[in-house]
Amino acid sequence: MAEEQQQQSINQAAEQLADAIRESYQALAERGSSAQELNAQLTQNFFNKVLENLRSQVEDTRQMSQQLSDQQQRAAEAGQQLTQESVDAYMGFVNSMFSFYQGSGAQTRRQT
């Protein structure tokens, strides 16, 4: 009978040990699963931020390109206007010189 009680105590202790080991593995598995979920969320957040930053940079680059294009267009228009005004001023000068010489020649003919 003492031997039977001792065997029951051993069996009970083995059962408690098995339960403790099972609970430890279960807790470890749950923590591993939680860690995987957290890592998945962190990875997703990281890539979402990267994509958001890339989209923002693309939009900024597009806006800067548009501004540069607008500035180049204004510079070209200003250059054309400056060239036209320079040509007009030069033509006015040439015309005034021609008129002066024509008037001078007509006056010389009248004097002779």
Image: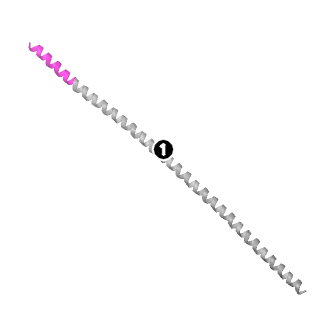
Residue 17, percent from left and from top = 78, 76
Vertical comparison of 12 with 84: above or below = below
Vertical comparison of 32 with 56: above or below = below
Residue 56, percent from left and from top = 51, 50
Examine the image and state in which quarter residue 91 appears: top left
Read off the magenta span. Answer: 95-112
Residue type, mark 1 in image? Arg
Examine the image and state in which quarter residue 25 appears: bottom right
Q: Label 1: how many residues lie within 10 Å, few (<14), some (14-19) or many (20+)?
A: few
Q: Report the residue at 50% width, 47% height from top.
A: 59
Q: Report the residue at 28% width, 28% height from top.
A: 87
Q: Residue furthest front?
A: 3
Main SS of the magenta part reads: helix
* Label 1 element class: helix
Q: Nearer the viewer, residue 27 or 90?
A: 27
Examine the image and state in which quarter residue 44 appears: bottom right
Q: Is residue 62 magenta?
A: no
Q: Report the residue at 22% width, 23% height from top.
A: 95
Q: Residue furthest bottom?
A: 2
Q: Which residue is identified by label 1?
A: 62
Q: Please state the total of marks drawn on the protein image.
A: 1
